[in-house]
Image (cartoon, helix red, strand yellow):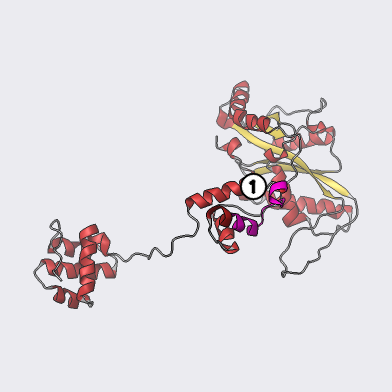
């Protein structure tokens, strides 16, 4: 087999200089072997210098001619091509987002086995359930509990609210003679705690059904909570009922948490005590009601779910005082984790427009 000529834009001196700069031992050894060839050594001598066969030296020369010194660095083998390509993954994501039509597909939610069957019917790809599950998780999908959606919800109104939020923020800032950066975006909501306290999912062996404490009594209280996700802070009160008087107390608490010299836009739903004529709204707060029947726009709803799942469920309250204490402990645990408030509360439409 005829020897391959080396590329003519390199020489022995440049190869040795590259070998001195290299931090990869294998690349250094290969560059020195090729430098020897440039100096007139035979391929067999270069092979002895590199401690390999002449055929391997030939492979080095081919890589060097194509890519220069970088071609002599060991690279990770590409491995087997993934079963699901970009087009398959995009189609799978659309399938999950659209959800099933019960009358057509016979199920009310997609299971992994349903999606694997669909991939076979659509693309003739026999993907295992594990493969489909890994693909979904890699794309950011998780099996999450769904919240009820009102049948009369107007999606166009919700989208208009989100799109118009930056303009509304600028309008409020101008009215308060402030720069937009001096506006804090807050969200507020209430959660009823107690009243047949909930139980949550927990780890257990397959085929079993674990038990958890479930308080069947109806004593309850309310957490009035508000968060400013961009700053990772919040303000709350635990109160016995939801009414205008309680809301006024909560507004005072929020106003005290707003940074000096700044103004808060407080986003909340249209509950009666949020819109009551008797509200005493502090000067550093402007109320901004959400569209009707759109609680998913309020991240405090997600905060309540986190607190129930991790701090307040699976309990039997010994007394009403203990119920109050545990509500306060749960809220203070959240306040001590500003990153948690940010992770749960930040929304693209409200903070990254």
Which residue is farthest left? Answer: 40
Q: Position of residue 294 (x, y in %)?
A: 72, 36
Disc 1 element: helix
Is residue 258 visible to the viewer in this orientation of the structure? Answer: no
191 is higher (above) or lower (below) than 74: above
Q: Is residue 262 magenta?
A: no
Question: Does residue 333 appear to the left or right of 211 in the view shown?
Answer: left
The image quarter containing residue 24 is bottom left
Report the quarter where the N terminus lies: bottom left
Please name the predominant secondary structure of the magenta segment in the image: helix
Q: Position of residue 236 (x, y in %)?
A: 74, 43
The image quarter containing residue 182 is top right
Residue at left 23%, top 61%? Answer: 69
Magenta segment range?
A: 103-118
Task: Report which residue position mark 1 lands on.
Answer: 344
Q: Position of residue 15 (x, y in %)?
A: 17, 63
262 is higher (above) or lower (below) than 227: above
Mark 1: give few (<14), some (14-19) or many (20+) Cα within 10 Å: some
Residue 167 or residue 41, whichever sits in front: 41
73 is higher (above) or lower (below) than 338: below
Residue 114 or residue 12, whichever sits in front: 114
Residue at left 60%, top 58%? Answer: 116
Q: Position of residue 39 (x, y in %)?
A: 9, 68
Residue 207 or residue 345, whichever sits in front: 207
Report the quarter where the C terminus lies: top right
């Amino acid at each position: 087999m005829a020897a391959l000529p080396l590329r003519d834009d390199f020489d022995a001196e440049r190869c040795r200089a590259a070998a001195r700069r290299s931090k990869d031992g294998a690349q250094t050894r290969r560059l020195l072997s090729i430098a020897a060839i440039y100096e007139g050594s035979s391929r067999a001598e270069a092979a002895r210098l590199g401690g390999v066969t002449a055929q391997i030296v030939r492979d080095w020369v081919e890589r060097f001619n194509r890519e220069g010194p970088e071609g002599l660095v060991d690279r990770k083998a590409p491995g087997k091509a993934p079963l699901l390509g970009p087009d398959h993954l995009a189609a799978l994501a659309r399938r999950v987002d659209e959800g099933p039509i019960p009358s057509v597909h016979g199920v009310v939610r997609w299971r992994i086995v349903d999606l694997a069957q669909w991939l076979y019917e659509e693309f003739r790809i026999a993907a295992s359930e594990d493969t489909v599950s890994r693909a979904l998780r890699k794309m950011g999908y998780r099996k999450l509990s769904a919240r009820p959606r009102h049948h009369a919800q107007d999606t166009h109104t919700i989208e208009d609210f989100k799109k118009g939020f930056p303009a509304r923020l600028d309008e409020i800032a101008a009215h308060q003679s402030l720069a937009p950066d001096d506006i804090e975006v807050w969200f507020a909501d209430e959660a009823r705690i107690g009243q047949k306290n909930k139980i949550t999912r927990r780890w257990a062996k397959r085929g079993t059904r674990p038990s958890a404490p479930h308080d069947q009594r109806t004593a309850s209280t309310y957490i009035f909570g508000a968060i400013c996700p961009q700053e990772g802070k919040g303000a709350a009160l635990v109160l016995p009922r939801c009414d205008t008087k309680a809301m006024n107390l909560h507004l005072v608490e929020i106003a005290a948490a707003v940074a000096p010299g700044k103004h808060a836009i407080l986003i909340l739903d249209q509950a009666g005590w949020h819109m009551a004529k008797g509200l005493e709204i502090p000067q550093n707060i402007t109320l901004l009601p959400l569209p009707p029947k759109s609680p998913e726009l309020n991240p405090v709803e997600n905060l309540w779910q986190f607190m129930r799942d991790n701090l307040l469920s699976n309990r039997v309250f010994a007394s009403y005082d203990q119920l109050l204490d545990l509500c306060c402990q749960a809220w203070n645990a959240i306040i001590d984790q500003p990153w948690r408030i940010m992770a749960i509360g930040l929304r693209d439409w409200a903070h990254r427009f």
